[in-house]
Amino acid sequence: MSEVAAPARHRELGLTDAEYDLIVDRLGGEPNDVELAVFSLMWSEHCGYKHSRRLLGRLPTQGEHVVMGPGENAGAVDVGDGLVVAFKVESHNHPSAVEPFQGAATGVGGILRDVFAIGARPIAVLDSLRFGELDSKRSRYLMNGAVAGIGHYGNSIGVATVGGEILFGEPYESNCLVNAMCVGIASRERLVRSAAAGAGNLVVLLGALTGRDGIGGASVLASAELGADSASKRPSVQIGDPFEEKKLLECCLELLEHGLLESLQDLGAAGLSSSASEMASKGGVGIDLDVARVPRREPGMEAFEVMVSESQERMLCVVEPGRLDAVRAVCDEWDVRCTAVGAVTDTGRLRVLEEGEPVGDMPVEALVDDCPLYDLAPERPSEPVYAAPRARLEAGADLAETLLDLLRSENIASKRWAFEQYDGLVGSRTVRRPGAADAAVLHLGHDGASGAIAVSIDGNGRRVACDPYVGAVEAVLECARNLACVGAEPLGLTNCLNFGNPEKPHIAWQLEQAVDGLADGCRAIRVPVVGGNVSLYNEGGGGPIYPTPVVGMVGRVPDPASLPEAGFVEDGHAIALLGPFRPALAGSELEARRGKMAPGLPEVDLGAHARALEAARAAVRAGALATAHDVSDGGLGCALAESCLVHGVGARVDVDELVARLGQREDEADELDAALFGESPGGIVVAGPHDVVEQLIAGLSTDTAVILGETGGERLVIETGATARLALEVAAAREAFEHGVADHFS
Amino acid sequence: MRFGVVRFPGSCDEVDALLACRRFGDAEVVWHRERDLHAVDAVILPGGFSYGDYLRVGAIARFSPVMEAVTDFARSGGPVLGICNGFQVLCEAGLLPGALLPNTGLRFLCRQVDVRVANPDTPFTRACARDERLSLPVKHGAGRFYAPDGALDELEANGQIALRYAEGHNPNGSVRDAAGVSNEAGNVLGLMPHPEHATDGLTGSTDGGKLFGSVVEHAVERAAVAA
């Protein structure tokens, strides 16, 4: 049928001919402009998850603490005392690559709305960012803008930005990643769902005016590769207004507190189209919307433009007609616009009206459930997908030079330049600020609960590129290890899967492997996935990004008053290494600095890691350790140096036993490199009074616990037996660590 | 003793200020549309981004109805403490001298700094010793205090620069390291550091408590005199 008449318009909107035919079939005729626009967005990758939904089914979502799982605006877990913690991570990659300040700012704005849409007060934001290497002007421009944008939005709205990570690599040069995670808190009975209910109830739009900004953002930006003309897509990037959202946030929470709303949903990608369809779908009802009633920012907007506008700072809610006046009164107090724009019906259809005249009529089921799902055609690549990184470190560097180079390298160096631009304190809950511990810790005392939560966000794309399955497992373990360093038991996980074009077999393979890795990692440590987001088509002129699954976790800390820090605190403490740490150079930062990158990472014994995490958590919870710091990028050498430089406390350690654990190698230099700078999941450096640490070690097997040495002095000295291998002034280590990133912006 | 914490649209640290005040006395939130301060003994203008800080920091909030009552309260000698955005609002309202400009680094900055008590004879610093060092966090993008030289000489002579950043701790380029500035009578103080974020050992330093404690001492004394 459509062979003859198929207008090219649907292809411009990102729909295939087969998808167009399916729409014609579902509608029983050709779609008009409004219907085509709505379908093109609802069936985009960003809204419809058509290439990833089947794979995501492999992730475990059940757990004893889960209150809301995937499918709601955010996931939620029970933290006891009648409280739940809601959280979700979402990407805003393509908008940030096109316009970093507004792209990142609206990324934060969007994830905040997801959290207060379920009735939780946002209390923390974490960000996971990826850029090209910092000697590139474009990377500095993107990072400068994205960091300022995150700060602008989070600071202005009064939600603490408490943590995050920033990593660099050439594959992110044209396609940076901006993933933002929001954590909120609510009393369990205050949670609200987004399902519309009750034919005759009003559909009310709250917040900002609707303009032409962000039209088609979900399909144009989020669901296609970036090309040379990306700058011309700048008008598709939304503009954020954190003041408007601050009022909207307080207003929505007050409306919910008074029990005035039947349901609530944020307007994100695809604007009214998506929000109304999702609400109707979940409630098994229909919705009529009159676009003429939607308050506009500019004159002359077409009906379809109003339906797909991605103007920020808007929420859609369902209100019983008798409560509309009370809703208006609260909105007036907050100077928040409040307009009844439609009604719930029992038709099961999304009807778009303009001054009462129908201009679009679509079955909700077709919009939400009939989006075709595609099986991937994964194929393990026979050739390396990525070029090796540029070599930065000379081959003849000795161990001290190597350590300094790593500490100064942008992936390992302090990100203080960025996190000092964020208010990490507002809310008065922040027990561990950025840089003070491996996970941020927020106490719940003001919310009527004992204890605290710990939050972390992690993912190392380069390691996932080496081995998508093991790399994804490692992301889960690293996040859990960061939590263990503050004694937190993980309750739930959210993830953002940032990948290239899944229609390419090698990208599909990465995606499938990584999802399997996430699933196995989560099962091993019994953490359910409660929500997440998928960002595909992250490819620029230079090819695909590293496959980058980003994992965010929330855990419970029973006693925040006795937590260790990441740094050594005083002289004379015993230092030990906990965990099944088997460092190898494969996929390490050192290999990258040397310009090497080879496929494959060592296998991970999930059972051993799960047991070690429990042991580490118990050790921290016992309350007598002064220091606990995760060993990650740059290996044990960097972890020790980082612990030294926080308070300027040196250390003398002997790595003989660790070298022995790695087994005999032919080359002694290689052996030491692996022990000091090799990477592996599982390692945690701890320190504390001798009796405490010795007693801890005595209760663990030598496979998973070794005494390394003692804190003290002004140098980090690393020995094997009686031979000193490396001696570095702590001041020099700090100099390198503090300047590695900051100097690029001075 | 009761504190009133003003809440403007866009205030962010009002709950933090409320929690800090309640460690030392009673406290309630005063909505910006109120024209009556409910007979509170001290007023706090909290940090945040009132009205989005659009136009210029603090420039719109000063026109909120509540500011008339705050002005009357200040003129009658009542203690008014402006923290961060509250300091900016007080400058815009003409209750404090000088102005707050964008940080010299042109970036928002959140870090712990040390300040020294330059004048311990104000209602806000009376529990401190002269030159006492306090560790307080700052978090702002426009905290560079500025006034012309002549005016600064006068402020210094009057002891109106009540708090100074310790050497090497000035985060924003404030002239003469001014971190906290009072009016001539001494009953209105604005400061960029956040004492309300330094009252709980679990979340950092507790040095900010000295300021709240001072206000309570002062208010109790003032009430006794009035009685």
Image: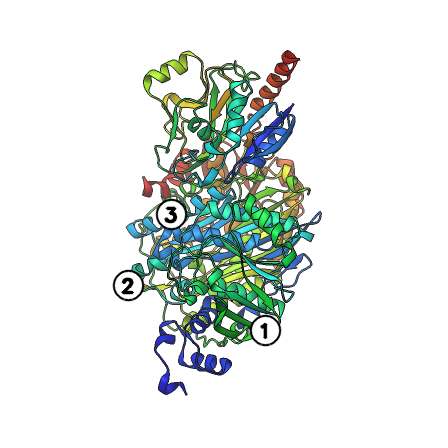
Q: Amino acid at mark 1?
A: Gly
Return the x and y of residue B55 as percentages of the image width and height: 38, 38
Q: Quadrant of the N terminus of chain A?
A: bottom left
| Image quadrant where residue B219 sits | top right
Q: Horizontal placement of A611 versus A387: left or right? A: right
- Provide the chain ID for the residue under circle 2: A
Reading the image, the residue beneath label 2 is A228
Identify the mark nearer the N-term, 3 or 2.
Answer: 2
Q: What residue is at 45 percent from the left and 48 percent from the top? A: A676
Residue B49 shows up from this direction: no
Secondary structure beneath label 2: loop
Count of labels in the image: 3
Q: Quadrant of the C terminus of chain A?
A: top left
Reading the image, the residue beneath label 1 is A348
Q: Label for residue A410? A: 3
Q: Amino acid at mark 3?
A: Glu
Identify the mark nearer the N-term, 2 or 1.
Answer: 2
